[in-house]
Image (tube, rainbow, N blue to C red):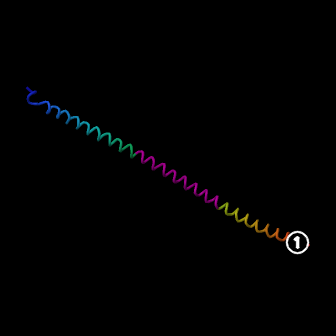
Amino acid sequence: MWEYVLGGATLFGLIVGLFSIYNGRATRKLLLEEQRHTRELIAKIDERIAKMDEIFAKMNERFTKIDERFEVLLKALDAHIKASTIEHQEIMRRLTEH
C-alpha cells in the first residue's frame, strides 16, 4: 500500500534530503573544528613572532654596542695613524736635511 503512496522518486528525494541534512551538519562541524585549529595555529605563530621580535631587539642592542666599540677603535686607530704620519714626516725631513 505504501508503495503506491510513496513513489520511487519521492522516496529517493526523501533519502537524498536526509543525507544532505546530515552532510551539511557534518560539514559545518568539520569547518568549525578547522576554524578552531587554524586560530590556535595563528596564536602560536603570533607567540613565536613576538619571541623573535624580542630576540631581534636584543641582537640589535648587541650590534649597537659592537658599533660603538668599533667607533672607539676606529677613532683610536685614526689618531695613531695621524701621529705616525707626523713622526714619519719628521723622520723623512731629518733624513733629507743631511
Q: Amino acid at mark 1?
A: Thr
From the top left corner, tell me how far across and down residue 7 is, in percent: 11, 30
Tally the numbered discs: 1
Q: Residue at x 65, y 62 (%)?
A: 68
Quarter-wise, where is residue 22 in the image?
top left
Quadrant where the image shows the C terminus: bottom right
From the top left corner, tell me how far across and down residue 9 is, in percent: 14, 32
Residue under pointer 1:
96
52 is within the stretch colored magenta: yes
Q: How crowded is the residue under tag 1: few (<14 C-alpha within 10 Å), some, or many (20+)?
A: few
Left or right of 57 on screen, residue 20: left
Left or right of 77 on screen, residue 54: left
Q: Residue furthest right?
A: 98
Q: Residue at x 32, y 43 (%)?
A: 32
Quadrant where the image shows the N terminus: top left
Left or right of 9 on screen, residue 51: right
Q: Residue at x 64, y 60 (%)?
A: 67
Q: Main secondary structure of the magenta part?
A: helix
Indicate the secondary structure of the residue bearing disc 1.
helix
From the top left corner, tell me how far across and down residue 35 is, in percent: 35, 44
Position of 43 relative to 60 (above/below): above
Q: Residue furthest top?
A: 1
Left or right of 75 on screen, residue 57: left
Range shown magenta = 40-67
Position of 30 relative to 7 (above/below): below
Foreground of the two, 21 or 4 = 4
From the top left corner, tell me how far across and down residue 79 is, in percent: 74, 67
51 is within the stretch colored magenta: yes
Foreground of the two, 48 or 96 = 96
Q: Residue at x 76, y 66 (%)?
A: 81
